Image (cartoon, coloured by chain):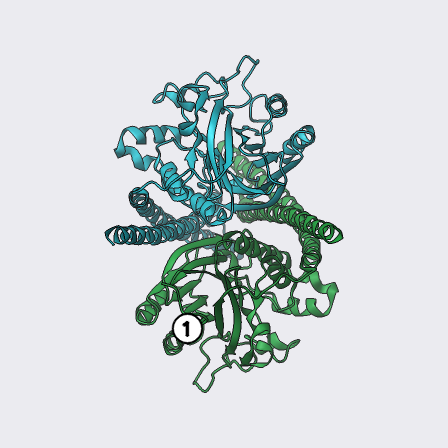
Chain colours: A cyan, B green
Amino acid sequence: MMKDMPFDFKVLTLNCWGIRYLSKLCSKRYKCISQKLGDASHDVALLEEVWSEKDYMKLKKKLASYYPYSHYFRSGVIGSGLCVFSKHPIIDTLLYQYTLNGYPFMLHHGDWFGGKSVGLVVLNISGIIVNAYITHAPVVDVQANHKMLHAEYSREKDAYHPHRILQAWELGQFVRHTSQMADIVLLGGDLNMHPDDLGNRLLRSLTGLRDSFIEAESYEGPQGGCTLIPQNSFTSKHEFYSFPQGIRIDYILFKGSDKYSINCRALQTTQAADGREFPISDHEAVSATLQIQQGTIQCLLSGAENGAIDVLNEARTELRVGLHVATGHQRGAGRLFGLSIALVLLSVAVVLCGVMSKAFSFILGAEILTEEGLPIVVLCLLGLGASLTALVAATAYLLFTTEIKALRGAEDEMRRQTHTLQHAVINNKGHAII
Amino acid sequence: MMKDMPFDFKVLTLNCWGIRYLSKLCSKRYKCISQKLGDASHDVALLEEVWSEKDYMKLKKKLASYYPYSHYFRSGVIGSGLCVFSKHPIIDTLLYQYTLNGYPFMLHHGDWFGGKSVGLVVLNISGIIVNAYITHAPVVDVQANHKMLHAEYSREKDAYHPHRILQAWELGQFVRHTSQMADIVLLGGDLNMHPDDLGNRLLRSLTGLRDSFIEAESYEGPQGGCTLIPQNSFTSKHEFYSFPQGIRIDYILFKGSDKYSINCRALQTTQAADGREFPISDHEAVSATLQIQQGTIQCLLSGAENGAIDVLNEARTELRVGLHVATGHQRGAGRLFGLSIALVLLSVAVVLCGVMSKAFSFILGAEILTEEGLPIVVLCLLGLGASLTALVAATAYLLFTTEIKALRGAEDEMRRQTHTLQHAVINNKGHAII
């Protein structure tokens, strides 16, 4: 049975900020979230940062009558925090974990432990196949990023930038390769990127996905579609010193196929508390009303390949910068490892000498080195410290090596994609001449 | 320009055993490998265990005139060891790293550091899109695996079994989701699984890929298509005590689409030295001559869904066994961590007491505890040992947590796939009744 055409399809995305015992008013906010999801008749809700599976189970139970289908994506140590609630049958799922997930030693960001991923749920809407992707990119070092946007010289302060470019690339590749048979493609989530950031441009040019905020016929919400706004009492005000009106980092992107076209009729973004006692999250929820109809009304913009090639070249330059930095880090970690091992060996040697002279003095009946107790303790502690440093340095070395491999791999893939696009441009020109 | 139909397409797969300085006759064997690849006119060569990028570059240089297109997949710390040489343009590539890659503490297997993956190269053969996948599954604990096949009670000795089921699942999911637009799908590599192993059956039932050894019209090579044979001077003889004729673990699988059909005309497997001074690897090379033609001659076997459901149920049981074991390991690691931390605190407390009494004795002018030097050193070493144990235990805890998440995630995906298949079976029956 096919759906009556055209029909509306409502999608919501929200970063729930659901860190149990750490996020403010977590359980109260979850109640509001489930109420919001129950009130508004969305077809699909894409939720991020639902870190606890217990919270997901609670939501699932409460929303069972509204959303009979749901999926929770598990990955990493803590989990991906991603889940999807749907009114339509979920016929397939797939998870792709990004190769690089920040650094494990940046504990306060927690990205490495979260196993940041992109999840795919395949929906069957009366025969129409919808591939809905949900993702959560790693935390932006907001200050560095703001500076970066304003002053190119401090770009290297944003340690995550090449990681984000790589993730945008991996996300785009994953979407591109797995959505070939989909009638409709949706991508929602917290991309942790500004609308014109390189990663965002790379993703859109690679996949052909369109931004619902830009395309919406009507919009209701904070200025500029911002989803991180100073009016929200849970956001820290220093995040906005460069962008006083807020930042747009949560997106709903979409595209049709040669069988179905899609456009955005309306977009709504919550505005902080919206009359309630408190906001439902530190991010605003984005809700898009999309219209799906049979037949294609889109056409490939001429010169799209050229634009994509430019973005790819820019991204490759970024990856090479990242590669340069990572190589430096790797070398540093290697040196630190060498030094620590030398220190461990030195401490062990000196301690052994001390112990042996003590043993000798004991055998000889004379107490030659009675005052050495304290230095030996200090040496032992030094040895302990050096051993731990060596272990940390070795781990860091392995991590940076992985980073280098991943960056080089992506750069390779990008080069190939550039060649393929260049080939397409030449062929198109050839056809035009003929 | 389309190719003349039907046409032959030759594929080779070889595990090159290319560990520099460790594999026997490594550089000499690489010379033979490049000679073999140059002599025989293969369309695509899928090589595994090319661990050093330098060796890949050498092969690339030597084979440039035979195979103008090639790709090296980078991942993990060492790399994936996977590379592809092709006569036809490679228009796209993608790499998927398996979620679980053995355990890092099983250093001698090296799987964790290798970042085991599946690589995809998309080839364009005069307009025909061929998705060629290459993979290398982790090392089998061969003895445990052999026992496992003969005596179910020792199944739990094969610590990698759930990992391999998970990888077979991930491999199948990756192939299924990324090959939707491909005209021809090929998968070659060292699957480290016997032909009838659960992982192998799962992969084939999930993707519909067919085994070239089973389908070949003619076959030349060791009995049973074995690729790990006792005649090969590089294999260790104790590997064959349950399978004296050898084991088949390297495969070429294939399938067509609704536009193109494919069948296997001939299969050849090398036989150890084959008259040369030494074999080219510890594995035998598999070479398939496939015939591609327009139109489809395949049909879905009735009851295929039922078979797939049975395999899925079997796989889910295996994953649940793995989950049970991993949970036990996780609990053990947690306990060890607690104990080590207690020991560290105890050592620190005792050492501090000793140091303080020494300081007191120094202040009071009396030497009360001069004999404590040696115990303090021992305590320091104990503290050092306990700290390292705590670190290792914490790391193990995180690893087992990741393992649990991955296994649960896959079990979830499998459950959904089972439901989708059951739904298909019911619908088909419904149609049959109508």
Q: As rendered, which of A93 and B290 lies closer to the eye?
A: B290
One can see residue A376 in this view: no
Residue located at (48% from left, 38% from top): A111
A388 in relation to B355, above or below: below
Residue B277, percent from left and from top: 43, 85
In which quadrant of the rendered image does the N terminus of chain B lie?
bottom left
Within the image, what quadrant is residue B253 found in? bottom right
Q: As rendered, which of B298 and A87 lies closer to the eye?
A: B298
The amino acid type, in three-letter code, at marker 1 is His
In the rendered structure, the answer to whether residue A384 lies left or right of residue A122 reads left
B429 in relation to B353, above or below: below
Residue A178, percent from left and from top: 50, 48
Image mark count: 1
Chain of the residue on which disc 1 is drawn: B
| Label 1: few (<14), some (14–19) or many (≥20) C-alpha neighbours in 10 Å | many
In the rendered structure, the answer to whether residue B245 lies left or right of residue A229 reads right
Residue most extreme to the left: A433
In the rendered structure, the answer to whether residue A392 lies left or right of residue A310 reads right
Within the image, what quadrant is residue A249 found in? top left
Q: State the SS at label 1.
A: loop
B257 in relation to B217, above or below: above
**Residue on which disc 1 sits:** B42
B386 in relation to B40, above or below: above
One can see residue A401 in this view: yes
Residue B182, percent from left and from top: 48, 57
Q: As rendered, which of A354 and A289 lies closer to the eye?
A: A289
Residue B81, percent from left and from top: 44, 62
